[in-house]
Structures are given as structure tokens and as C-alpha cells.
Image (cartoon, rainbow, N blue to C red):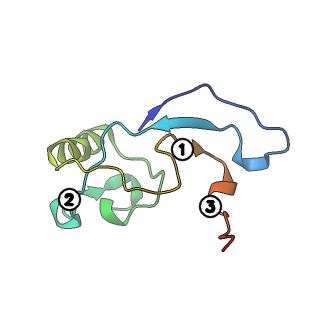
Amino acid sequence: AMMAGDIEEEEGGGDWTPTFKVEWVHLCELPFYCISSLLNPLDDGVQVIRSRDGQELPNELGKLLLLHMQRADSVALPETEVSPNLTLGNPNLLDKEDDG
């Protein structure tokens, strides 16, 4: 993803601010078996596929993971109510209730 807008400060947003929009540059399907051998030394040697969101990777491991992603087949964004230009940091996107 690539940052697609300015950082916006929201009043009373707590830990979720600031927010910004992202644009998906490359969306792919990368089966776990393709990268299951990649271990992260910054996470006690845990497999990359078991890492939590935001987990730091060493530069060389990150480059290798990106190489695998570049070689993977691109896929289209699924049709959803959520725009591909998401506003990250907005918890309301996750809490949207179905009115029906």
C-alpha cells in the first residue's frame, strides 16, 4: 500500500489518530507454503506467516518477502462496501453494523 493523502488529525480520536488514506499498489495471493521457511530473527525466529500485523522485519528479510509478493499473481480487489482508498486508523470501519 502507498500513502494516498495527507495525515489528518481528528479531535477526540484517542489512540487511533492520526489517520491517512492508502492506495493499494499491488494485491496478490501468496500461499503460506511459499514463505513458510522465512523466519524472523527479530521475533524469536517465528515464521513470518505467524507474525502479527506491524511486526518489524530485518531489511534483507523484508526485501525477500517483497520479492515473493512481486512474483505472485496479482488479483483484483474484491467488491465490497469499503473503498480501496481506506482511511487507516478509523475504528468505525471495523464496527459498522448491518442495518438490515
Instruction: Decide if residue 41 is on the left or right side of residue 37.
Output: right
Q: Is residue 25 left or right of residue 10?
A: left
Tag 3: amino acid: Leu
In the image, residue 95 sits, relative to residue 41, either above or below, namely below
**Whole-percent x, y for residue 84 in the image:** 46, 44
Along the viewing direction, whichever of 43 and 49 lies nearer the viewer:
49
Q: Is residue 4 or residue 77 the one in the foreground?
A: 77
Residue occupying the point 17% across, 67% down: 33
Nearest to N terminus: mark 1 or mark 2: 2
Residue 86: which numbered mark, if any?
A: 1
Residue receiving disc 3: 94
Residue at (16% x, 60% y) in the render: 34
Q: Which mark is residue 35?
A: 2
Q: Nearer the viewer, residue 83 or 6?
A: 83
First-in-chain label (3 vs 2): 2
Q: Nearer the viewer, mark 3 or mark 2?
A: 3
SS for callout 1: loop
Q: Judge the density around disc 1: few (<14), some (14-19), many (≥20) Cα neighbours within 10 Å.
A: some
Label 3: how many Cα within 10 Å (few below 14, some 14–19, many 20+): few
* Residue at 66% over, 74% down: 100
Please state, as top left, top right, bottom left or bottom right, where the N terminus lies in the image: top left
Which of the two discs, 1 and 3, labels the residue nearer the N terminus? 1
Q: Position of residue 54 (x, y in %)?
A: 48, 51
